[in-house]
């Protein structure tokens, strides 16, 4: 079964409705879309009244390898689940509060494959694709630390396929 | 005639291109340098050589978790590096 894979790494924003329409096909009863957004953050985290507030995230990538890595995880998801189309768009550069960062969209005959594949793709995006976030607050900036919880989430997919 | 894939000749003097990203790039103060291998080296040997050649690199690498890619594939620190290869060093990834 051919799976249409569309992966992009770009500074430009994306339009969810366009990506949703592009994923639709007659043999698919399910489309799952995930969007990641720049959310508000405070420093120190437990004292929002002393706020140094987040202004933007800056996303750095490794041109060539980032695109290739995203395509590789999309191919893995398509091998594991019954899918017909996968779209992954990851933005780079300076993204202000509220901006869209990432879109993962999956079309499948049935929803269980679409939900699971979308979840798996996000876990792999967070752990295995060369992308780095710098967090810009009003009065400071620092590189985000990798989270142990993201690595643990990846383990869910490392058991043998169904 | 063997069925081995053709491998283009690369001079042993060809430098290795080393790329740095994110926090590591900022700590080192540059995004790229060229390194001539004195002998065949693994990724761990490349890190040691870089540290020996530059106190700034040594300081940037010290106590930091560093991942490596060889020709744009994630590899372990035991992977062997050849002349002309592209090595990238970077902190754990934080995309998505």
Image (cartoon, grey):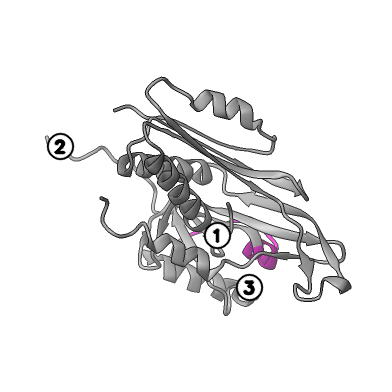
**Subunit ID for the residue under disc 1:** B
Label 3: state its secondary structure.
Answer: helix
Mark 2 or 3, nearer chain start: 2
Q: Around disc 1, counting alpha carbons within 10 Å, would you say few (fewer than 14), some (14 to 19), or many (20 or more)?
A: many
- Determine if marks 2 and 3 fall on one subunit: yes
Q: Position of residue B35 (x, y in %)?
A: 52, 59
Residue A72: give its label.
none
**Subunit ID for the residue under disc 3:** B
Q: Position of residue A10 (x, y in %)?
A: 63, 37
Q: Residue under circle 3?
A: B60
Relative to residue A27, is residue A162 drawn left or right?
left
Residue B19 occupies quadrant? bottom right
Residue B93: give its label.
1
As measured in the structure, the alpha-carbon distance from the residue carrying label 3 to the one carrying label 1 is: 17 Å
Could one spot residue A78 in this view of the protein? Answer: yes
Q: Position of residue B93 (x, y in %)?
A: 55, 59
Residue A100 occupies quadrant? top right
- Within the magenta stretch, is there residue A53? no
Residue at image coords 39%, 48%: B11
As measured in the structure, the alpha-carbon distance from the residue carrying label 2 to the one carrying label 3 is: 45 Å
User: Which of A44 and A138 lies nearest the eye of the viewer?
Assistant: A44
User: Which of B31 and B90 lies nearest the eye of the viewer?
Assistant: B90
Q: Is residue A92 above or below residue A143?
A: above
């Amino acid at each position: 079964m051919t799976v249409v894979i569309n992966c992009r790494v770009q500074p430009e924003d994306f339009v969810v409705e366009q990506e949703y329409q592009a994923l639709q096909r007659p043999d698919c009863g399910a489309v799952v879309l995930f969007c990641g957004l720049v959310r508000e953050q405070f420093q120190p985290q437990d004292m929002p009244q002393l706020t140094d507030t987040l202004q933007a995230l800056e996303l750095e990538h490794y041109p060539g390898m980032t695109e290739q890595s995203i395509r590789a995880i999309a191919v893995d998801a398509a091998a594991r689940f019954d899918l017909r189309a996968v779209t992954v768009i990851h933005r780079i550069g300076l993204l202000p509060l509220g901006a869209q960062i990432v879109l993962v969209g999956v079309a499948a005959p049935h929803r269980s494959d679409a939900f699971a594949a979308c979840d798996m793709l996000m876990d792999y995006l967070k752990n295995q694709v060369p992308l780095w976030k710098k967090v810009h607050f009003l009065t400071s900036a620092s590189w985000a630390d990798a989270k142990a919880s993201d690595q643990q989430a990846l383990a869910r997919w490392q058991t043998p396929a169904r | 005639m063997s069925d081995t894939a053709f491998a283009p000749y690369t001079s042993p003097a060809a430098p290795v291109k080393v790329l740095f990203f994110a926090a590591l790039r900022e700590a080192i103060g540059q995004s790229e340098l060229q390194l001539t291998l004195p002998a065949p080296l693994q990724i761990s040997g490349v890190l040691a050589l870089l540290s020996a050649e530059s106190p700034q690199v040594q300081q940037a690498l010290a106590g930091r978790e560093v991942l490596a890619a060889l020709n744009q594939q994630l590899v372990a620190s035991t992977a062997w590096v050849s002349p002309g290869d592209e090595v990238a060093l970077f902190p754990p990834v934080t995309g998505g």
